[in-house]
Image: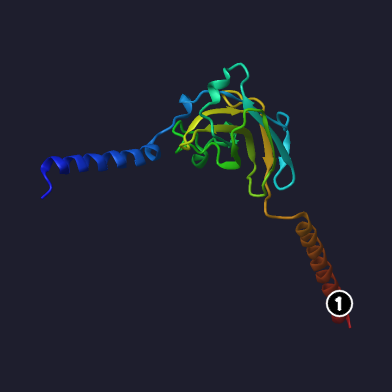
Amino acid sequence: MVSASAASVSVCLILLLLGSLMGPVMAEVYFSSLPRNLIVSASPKPGQVLEAGVDNITITWGLNQTLPPNTAAAYKNVKVRLCYAPNSQADRGWRKTTDDLKKDKTCQFGITQQPYSEVNSTFVYGVERSIPSATYFIRVYAVDSSGAVVAYGQTTDAKKKADLFDVVGITGRHASLDVAAACFSAFSVFSLVFFLVLERKKTKK
């Protein structure tokens, strides 16, 4: 029979194991606690309007060179994301900014995920057709080996008011469809007039 002390030790070991497994999953990361250690730039000029499914964005990021080189020792990967600006979040709860990154809806669109590099990195992003019309900026998260976000950088200021750009989304209608609809309408009107004239001639006879 297993002694009470042995059973207690077994229970403790199991709890420790579960704690080690669940710890990273349950850990909360708050944006306000992250250092802004990355310098991020993007090709769109302030106020520039891009077309979804047509235009590209060139994004460059790297460690702030004023920081010690060992600052990035824990950085394993970076996640580059397209984020809503405040004016495109107003009255839209599904885009709401929350300090808890697990609940934050600011940066919903993933651009790329790559291993962290000690030298500046560049990525060319083709604005996807699914991106809705809104005002945006770019944010880059640095991630450690456990997958936790440990630092960030972005193309705008802390209040997210500077260096913003717009994307015009695809509405679902194409110009050729509008032309076809106009032609069909004109043909319908012409057919109606022709029919009325024909009927009037028959009546006179």
Residue reaching furthest to the bottom: 205
Residue that mark 1 sits on: 198
Q: Residue at x 63, y 39 (%)?
A: 134
Sort mark 1 into few (<14), some (14-19) or many (20+) by Cα contacts within 10 Å.
few
Q: Please provide percent x and percent y for residue 94.
A: 50, 42
Q: Please provide percent x and percent y for residue 27.
A: 39, 35
The foreground one among 119 and 47 is: 119
Q: Please provide percent x and percent y for residue 202.
A: 86, 81
The foreground one among 132 and 139 is: 139
* Secondary-structure class at tag 1: helix
Using residue 41 as the reference point, say whether residue 158 is left or right of it: left
Q: Please provide percent x and percent y for residue 97.
A: 50, 34
The type of colouring in the image is: rainbow
Q: Amino acid at mark 1?
A: Leu
User: From what the image shows, is residue 193 above or below residue 62?
Assistant: below
Using residue 78 as the reference point, say whether residue 99 is left or right of it: left
Tell me where residue 114 sits by quadrant: top right
